[in-house]
Amino acid sequence: MLLFIAAFACLGGFLFGYDLGLIAGALLYMDHDVRLHLTTSSSEIVVGMAKLGAVFGTFVGGALMVEFGRKKAIAGMGMFFLVGPLVMAVSSNAPGLSFGRFVVGLGIGASAVCVPAYVGEMALPETRGALVVTYELMLCLGMVTSALVDWLLRNVSQNWRWMVLAPAFPAMVMLLGVFVLPESPRWLVVQGRLSKALDVLHSLREGGVSDSPDTSTARVERELMELWSAVEKERGEKMMGDDGGMENTGDHDAVDAEEDTDTASASHTTTRVIRAAVPCDDPYAQTPRGGGVPRATGVLATTTSFLKTLRSVLSESAQLFSKSHPEHKPVRVAAVLAFFNQASCSTSLVNYAPLLLRGAGMRSEADAVLFASLISVCKFTGVLLSMFTVDRAGRRPLLIWGSVWCAVSMFLLSAAVANAKATATLAAMCLFMLSFSASWAGVFWVLLSEMFTMRWKGSAMASATAILFATGSLVDFVFLSAARAMGGGAFILVGLICVFAGVYAHLSVPETKGKTLKEVQRGFE
């Protein structure tokens, strides 16, 4: 059940990866379309606009999941992935392509916030790492799929238009998520829908829906009580912060109720109390006691409410970087990890791989596209490996050793590019992608899903992910020019960045393996 939910929710990751892979191949054929008039600079803009759109998409995604819930936010992201490819497919110039890429970027940014948060909230502590990595695994699957589709379309007339249109079809499937996915129990508790939250927890943990609290298990009841208590605590702290500033610096999710519930009998009593607090699943309930005001209805009212939530997310995101903020430390760590994740040129290398191979002496565009797909295969292999190691080896060791091998790979790539050796260039890029994907690629999203309390999760994840995409956009905008101007020297610089990333992970990232979300968040105090 959980694996199905994770796989379906992670369609956003698949479409993100598909976009990464398709632009790498399509860009070669766009260069030959004289109507587009693409130059080195305009090619960098077309590639980088997706990441720029993702910067804004992170805040849109944070607001969507706060206002409408996780599953509706995930389904809604499908619209960006549907409209963006349609715009690109009918474009006849670089500005049109750039706009379409920007729209796709909104979906990429929103999915990067919503999907890991959703999957992390649905999973058990002992499997959370592997399930969240499913997002990155689906991203890799999208990259491999798009690279192969690009190669199959190599001899089709106007092939780049079909390449950029292809993601619209899985986007239609993503729109069905609102009918397929269950809502996050955490979000249901925030809305006061405790009975529904209990049913979802039963379906996740036991495979069936409980008709009576007497048939529920102690573990599910304790989990529900922990969520309920955490929301109550966070609500009280928010009211305190609104009245007298952000005075609390403790753990928002620190809940002791679980530790006091030692028997199934006590747990049954707790659940009866919670059910009595919310006798029915009132869709308008805004608090765990059902004492809120109805949600806005109608298109205008819903839009107004969403824009208000978006403003709130932006305002809270700015507050997060204040040293007095209770989430300052995890936000700072997440921001630095986001910078290193993209400053290592992890996605730029994929975007420009065929061009790099051609520059290193590979014979034809078709060969460059085909062999560049091996980089995507290495990424898929690395992420698959991390699914089995992230909950065994731990998050911190993977980041440290991954940085070491990424640095080695970049130094080798520098030598290969300087000597124009196509085979060595491909081998070095494959080694880098395998190393990065087995470590930083998936571990970043796992940590991001664990580090923040429910009260600040939407804003905190949006902020960290916005930094990720802003860094990625900047790197995409300058990568091709830097590689052509500096040659192998550019990759020596990237290798040094990987070294600094490993040092930072060693000094500043705590281990979160096997811990509950409450314990993880306590570790950042």
Image (cartoon, rainbow, N blue to C red):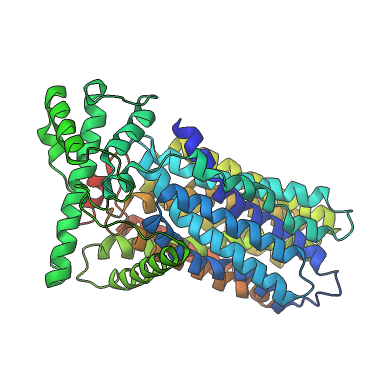
* Residue at (55, 68) in percent of width and height: 53
The one nearer the camera, 434 or 126, is 126
Please state the total of marks drawn on the protein image. 0
* Quadrant of res 309: bottom left
Is 451 on the left-hand or right-hand side of 248? right
Above or below, 62 relative to 142: below
Above or below, 176 relative to 272: below
User: Which corner quadrant holds the C terminus?
Assistant: bottom left
**Where residue 140 sits in the image (x, y, percent)?**
60, 47
* Residue at (13, 35) in percent of width and height: 259
Is 433 on the left-hand or right-hand side of 5? right
Is 201 on the left-hand or right-hand side of 162? left
**Where residue 344 sits in the image (x, y, percent)?**
53, 63
Q: Is residue 167 visible?
A: no
Q: Can residue 111 be seen in this view?
A: yes
The one nearer the camera, 88 or 353, is 88
* Residue at (80, 67) in percent of width and height: 30
The one nearer the camera, 280 or 171, is 280
**Where residue 250 sits in the image (x, y, percent)?**
15, 57
